[in-house]
Image: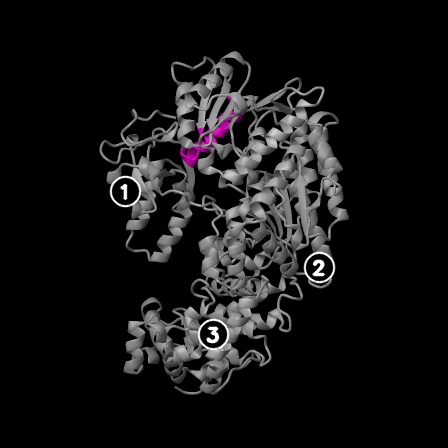
Amino acid sequence: MSSFSKHRLVSHPHQSLYRHLSSVDEVSERALRAKVLGPQLFPGLDAEVLRRLLVFFHDFGKGTDFFQWMITQVAQKENASFAGLDADYAQSFAAHAEPFVAQIGREGGPLRGHAQLGAFVVQTALPADADPLLRAIVFEVIARHHGNLRNFDQAAEREAEAHDELLSEQWKRMNHGDYRAILADTGLGYAEDLAVVRQRSRRTFFTRVFLELSRNETLLPYLQTVFLFSLLLSGDKGDLMLPERTLVGRGRRCNEQLIEQFKLSSFGTPSQDGINQWREEAYQRVAANLLEHANAGFYSITLPTGMGKTLTAYNAAIQLQNRLADRWQTDNPHCIPRIIYCLPFTSVIDQNAAILEKILALDPDMVGALAKHHYLADWPEAKDTHEQALNYSEKEYLVEGWEYTLTVTTFVQLLHTVVSNRNRQLRKFHNLANAVVVLDEVQSIPPKYFNLVSKLFVALHEQLGTRFVFVTATQPFLMNPADGYEPVELTDPTKVYTRLAFERMNRIDLDVRLWKDGPEEIAEQTDIFARAIQEEADSSFLIILNLVRESQAVYHSLAGEAYRQPNVEYLYLSSAILPVLRREIIERVKHPPAGKRIVLVSTQVVEAGVDIDLDVVYRAFAPLDSINQSAGRCNRNMRAGWRGSVRLFKSKGAKDIYDVVLLEKTERTLKKQLSTEAKLPDGQPGILPEARFYEMNQTYMHEMRRAVADGSDASRQILEDLYRLNFEKANAAFQLIPKTYETFGVFIDDPQNLPKVSVKLDGMEKTVNSSDVYQAMQNILQATAEDRWERKRQLRLLRPALLQYVVQIPTRYLPEDLHEDARARPFIRMGTEAGERNYARCYNLITGYFLPDAAPNHQSF
């Protein structure tokens, strides 16, 4: 080869290494410059310096002959003209590499890899006095950037002595001249002597780091690692997935009057009486108190269900975004905080996002500002005012990286980003910096993780400037006072008004007489439900049970000949029902047929965020926060002259799905409240008015924190792993939604009886049935012309429609002859044709799965 050139080395079949590194530099620089970081995140070494070192050394090993032979061979097949490359170099290298290099290039193995060498060499580019632990973190980020973070322990053999052959062979065949030409304009360099590279990463160095980590009791090293890892991934993947770089790191201020405009256009002038007056009063108080406490890090909005918490929370987030942007304007005008709105279940995200879409539609400047991020969501077609429609890779990058001004997502997405070792989950971590994170129904976080989440949120606030807003009717004391922060209650920092907001409520009573003295058997309880439905002929009913099988039994009995009442619409809802049907059922509850009243039998899927309102709610015994959520579905709009009834009854199945300690604390709290109520002049035995809920909830939450959260081994062990950078152990231990039994995915194909869905096929929006969707998937999988990335793209676009027809069926409910096939696939198809794949063997469109071959054919919905 002739003189050295920065354009010579190849990174991808269509791209030089110089172009790739320059693009990674541009994307990651845009991502970082839009952030204001805490001064202690990287003490003694600027984040921008670290970013550039990661960018220009993460692919250092691509400069070896081993990698160059491999990539030029691929380029010959995929880019025959070598467009975008130094064609003379690529052709010559592909044809004339030495035999040993070609052999390694063909066989693969560590010598063909490129991340490890860069992790060693970058140590010579770091300042000599750099903190050893931070040096080790930089090593780890580069070494793992094509995979997941690993436990930082001695078992991984990171030291140079364990990689002697790799270092010797790759260094000998490294194109140093060409790589230094790439670095020429960066001001960066590295040692010319391999001995120096080895010396910087010897066993003694890593032993010292392990010793320091063994004494570490802070989350700072963890945050440093995942932030830098995320930042590098953002740049590395952004180069290939995002042709338009300006879409990165760019947020927009939301109009501070957006929610006011929406309220006026949707509801008119606020009512001056009843619950609407109270909603407006709470809304205004939250907005005013936020302005007075705009410098806080943690906020809570505690209001009874049905008091407009969602719009109040949206407005609080928008106001806070603007106040923070004002504060950072002088030092960093690029920093516009994102709003990340989190909900516990995917089932309520679409409902929530639909409201936001209507709000944003009032402001033309907010077009393309919102994304939904969960496994059932379609990706938006645009971002900001970017005129071109987004292609697949751009959508994937922007949505999964939380690049939008507003992202509506799940608790799982948020918390499994904060605690993770996985490449794909961590890519968005850096965009938590300066974000306003709203957790709606925050009580859904398991108490055993409270201390873990509290410490992580405090670390995110102190080091990354993240703000948190907790929204619920039952504040769970998530934050540990020992961590130094107590949320500012935005309804009233003194909480006097907060208590009043609950105590003046007179919509419902909690009747616990069946729980105290009623029957335990489902059959006897069903008889009570049936008599109430018959006798209270003007009332609608919601009956919530803890187990799917119990709820199915109750539904079949009530809707059967023995109990069925005229002019009643009997409906059923649980996780056993297909997603495509759940939405339709909710709409039926909201808008019953003329002349009919609703009786809905359900599991706890209706509890959080489902906007339905019924007259009488029966609730199987459960932890008090779940009882509260169920009560929120009863007379939530405070119908004039009506007092709803929430009736608690016994549940044998409660201990199968709930923490026994939480059940015990609930029982203790209820009995204490009943004892207090009995002493009041107007008290009724066994009945607790809504006005007592606030005091009762406070008692329960204090008890629960002391009993479950404060002594949680789960939080303590995961924190210990995070302190030690045991990424894999922490990720494995943290399960926000534990899977307690095996399930199989089943695609139910019944075009005659299932609703159609909208999907984009062949570039056009179409309304299709279940068979169309399944056939589209088969066509994609069977197409031989497309490469695997194109198939992946098409399948991802089809996935939201596909999963509308997929239900997870527990092992014992799927016929045994289908188990082997079901274990080998994400889901199997069952249709209406005769034979072993007929879904009527184990599934019913009305109530879901049942024991194989034990029930009559399905009923149409």
Which is in the foreground here, disc 1 or disc 2? 1
From the viewer's perspective, is 503 left or right of 806?
A: right
Q: Is residue 685 visible?
A: yes
Nearest to the observer: residue 76 or residue 337? 337
The reply to whether dot 2 and dot 3 touch (C-beta < 8 Å) is no
Quadrant location of residue 805?
A: top left
Residue 819's tag is: 1
- Marked residue nearer the N-terminal end (2 or 3): 3
Residues in magenta, as a range: 573-592
Q: Is residue 240 above or below residue 691?
A: below
- CA gap, disc 2 and disc 3: 35 Å
Q: Residues within 10 Å of mark 3 (few under 14, many from 20)?
A: many
Residue 558 image offset from top left, x and y in percent: 43, 19
Residue 444 image offset from top left, x and y in percent: 55, 41
Kindly identify the amino acid type of the residue bearing the numbered disc 3: Ala
Callout 1: helix, strand or loop?
helix
